[in-house]
Amino acid sequence: MSTEWRKVTDLFTAALEVRPEARSDFLADACDGDPELLTEVESLLRSHTDSADFLKDSAVMEVADRVIADGTLEKGSSIAGQYEIESLIGSGGMGDVYLARDTRLNRKVAIKLLPFASADNLDRVLNEAQIVSALNHPNILTLHDIGSTEKGERFIVSEYIDGTTLREKIGSLSIDEIIEISCQASSALASAHSAGVIHRDIKPENIMIRSDGIVKVLDFGIAKLAADSSDIRHLDPHIDAKNNNSMLLGTVNYMSPEQATGETADQRTDLFSLGVVMYEMLAGDVPFDGADLLDQIATKTPTPLSQFRKDAPPALHSIVERCLEKKREDRFASAAELTDALMSVNTGDNSIHSTSGNRIANYLMKNRKAGSGGSVRSLFGMRAIWGIGAIAVLVISLLVTNGLSYLTRPLAATPEVTSPEKQEPPPSSEAYQSYLRGKFLWNKRTGDDLKKAIAEFERAVALDPNFALAYVGLADCYSMLEFYVGMPAGEALPKAEAYAEKAVELDPTLGDAHATLGNIYYGMWQWDRAERELKRAIELKPGYEKTYQYYYLLLRDTGRSNEAIQQIQKARDLAPVSLVINVSYSRSFLLIKDYENCLTATRDLIGLYPQYSSNYVTLGYALLGQDKKDEAIAAFEKAVELERTGQTLSALGYASAITGNTSKAASLAKELEERYPLHQALGREIAAVYVGIGDHENAFAWLEKDFDSRSTELSTISYLPPFDPIRETPRFQDLLRRMGLPARSN
Amino acid sequence: MDPGASTQLLKEWSNGSALVLEELVPLVYMELRKQAARYMRRERPGHTLQTTALIHETYLKLVDQRQADWKNRAHFFGISSKIMRRILLDHARSRSSEKRGGGAINLPLEDDSVAAQEPKSVDLIALDEALDRLAEIDEQQARIVELKYFSGLSLNETAEVMKVSRTTVANNWNVARAWLYRELTR
């Protein structure tokens, strides 16, 4: 700085302190003999007077607008013709997240754009994300859609969460809230792990807390994209060149020792990261931080939690410390184990022991007071409910991965966890616990468990005779007894019907009850009554995807193919990644002999669920339709290889027969016949093989067996491809007529 | 982003490594964007951003708190002011090339004596050039303008960051503002 300018500044400052009317005298005096200085200061003083607001407001707001606008989609712009952008709600290493409106289904959604992900990884990762979402776990963010923008940028559409991230809550959480959040997050992990997906990036930013207290874990499977896309450069012109790749992106504080040392992650990796999150919730600070972070993670024992939170029960401290063990063998073996441990922490906040049962009771009480739409935080007490749900989900997803066929059974849809939002809390928490256990057992889908589930639901209604949902549970159990226990449908379904009717009587507005009842009538071949109930269910609960799926089954078997296709598409719109619904969807193309679309849909689904045998059965039928016999046989063989069920054996037997391999067909028919008394094959599955062999006599004999036992889904023969050769015979038409079905042609 | 890494970069930068600035810019930029999005989500529709909060949060995110000292903080604000200035300038330039006369963005520049219906705008390109000239005359004053105007720091915060008294900041801010105004209204 020049001395000249120093003088100007000093004089200007001094002049400002002089009253305006005295300034010119003051300056004339001070600048005596220096007219240039006088002119300069006077000029600046004039500017000062004129510039009242100049630069007074900082440009930060402008900058914020600018940085947000950079590469940001404008409000109202459309993605894939279906989503209308509302605003940017987040931005991270992987891309931007927007609040948008799904204009087709008229709902709020969150859209995450993934501009940096490399395509080869992307599909695999998105598959994982879809698999996790399909678990329908209440603590896992639900994925609605995946697609590409017009520019080829991939995006993920998910439910929009009205809430905040855990990051913003840290520091203000009670012990009970901390346990609750941990429990719900752990339950989400247990479910994802059971489907073989590891999160890899658990941190407070990936855990959201809805305003009603429900925790949602985000970005399953997606986290690994971040590592693959350390290229953040494209986002912005300010980010240039050469650097970045050497930078560690992502939050390192939550990384596990195995990740820090470059080993492969497994499910216990997530437990470590969740341990760091729990530690931070309790201590207000992360356990490892500083310049030598990676070293610390690998070797440092964190400061004992007891130094931070004396109000926390020691059991909780031990749980967190066990999660933070350096060697994964020393941690909990699974998230399910961690969830159990968290559920059993006694916080001693009540005079009575605050174990899970009481927490449920407390939750129900609070929820009742708050009303269904209440915004009162009801974190407290929910973990027990989700805990049980999580186990149920875990079991079911194991069933899916092991490929146990429950698919063709209409009621055995996607795993369900009872959401307390959806229903009126019952007055008795004991009844509710029985109900939850019943749901859990029902979800396991074995004969023994179904019987136990019935006992639980019966207990629930004994304790609370007005518990409508428990009656729905009973109805659902009885409607499945034919498949799992071998109780003749003629005996089981009337009982199921009575229970569903009781539920409707107790609560005529319960959509679930009408849907279940409709599906039972479908099984009882009472087509008109079924349709009435299903229509009523749609009126009462239009967002319940199962109703549309049930309606699809009804329309399909009664020959209303085009309507059927519309309904299954509605179901799919509501639950785009549901396995059960997608299987129905892919098969719906068979109704109109659209084999090309059937193949496309089925192959997409196989991409998602490669281990699921029913998909290969669909594939085989479509290939047979195109007269690609060898490929069809290969598909059916794959199905059998994955799983020997009545369905897969029957399909392979039929295909073997029509391709001339009669001996193989005969041996498969024999195997099926042996299974029949064990309730492991249905009459129509055996009949299909005989149709292939050309032994129509035997085929009809087996169909009649199903008819005599009023077998629930015998009506599927009205469309299943193996019956094409006999469908137009008088005997077959007579069978349809006796079931109340219209005549059907090929 | 690992706070340890950016802290290290900040240190290197303060030791005079110009190359490091290039590495820091994208990191600060990303974090700014993230924080801005977060604020916008929280603050809308009132649309009132606590001006210093944005830059403070960005700082907290980027810098390892255990190693953070006043020196680091000062350096960080120094960098972020430059980055924010650059963001606005780039934007103004691109607008200016899009349409003639678009270089100005809507910043209040109201003359008390004129009951202006529409506030006059600051020509950011001209402001940027003037600020460069000011830096040649008085670097300290130019920095004060950067910190106060582009990072939204208060007089006290600016004083803390620059390690001078509040009065010094206030006096220099006044004269710098008058000088810049004159440059822009010539």
Image (tube, coloured by chain):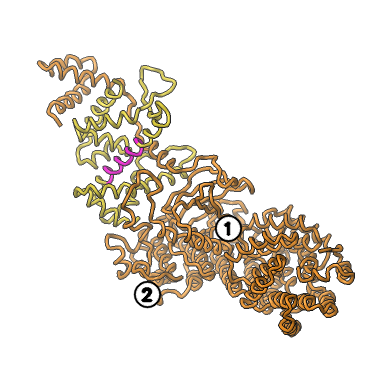
Question: Can residue A483 be seen from the camera position used here?
Answer: no
- Give the colour of chain B: yellow
Q: Chain of mark 2?
A: A
Q: Which of the labelled discs sits on residue B105, or is there none?
A: none
In the rendered view, would you say A476 is above or below B95? below
Q: Is residue A724 within the magenta segment?
A: no
In the rendered view, would you say A285 is above or below A692? above
Question: Can residue B128 be seen from the camera position used here?
Answer: yes
The quadrant where residue A397 appears: bottom right
Q: Amino acid at mark 2?
A: Lys
Q: Which of the labelled discs sits on residue A366, or is there none?
A: 1
Q: Is residue B77 within the magenta segment?
A: yes
Q: Disc 2 versus disc 1: distance between alpha carbons?
A: 41 Å
Q: Amino acid at mark 1?
A: Lys
In the rendered view, would you say A190 is above or below A672? above
- Quadrant, the N terminus of chain A: top left
Provide residue A569's location: percent of width, then percent of height.
Answer: 69, 56
Main SS category, magenta section: helix
Q: Which of the labelled discs sits on residue A327, or is there none?
A: 2
Q: Which residues are magenta?
A: B76-89
Comparing A635 with B74, the one in front is A635
Please give the letter of the chain rendered in orange.
Answer: A
Residue at 68%, 75% in the rendered image: A648
Residue at 85%, 67% in the rendered image: A728
Comparing A651 with A441, the one in front is A651
Q: Residue furthest left?
A: A33
Provide residue A342's location: percent of width, then percent of height.
Answer: 48, 69
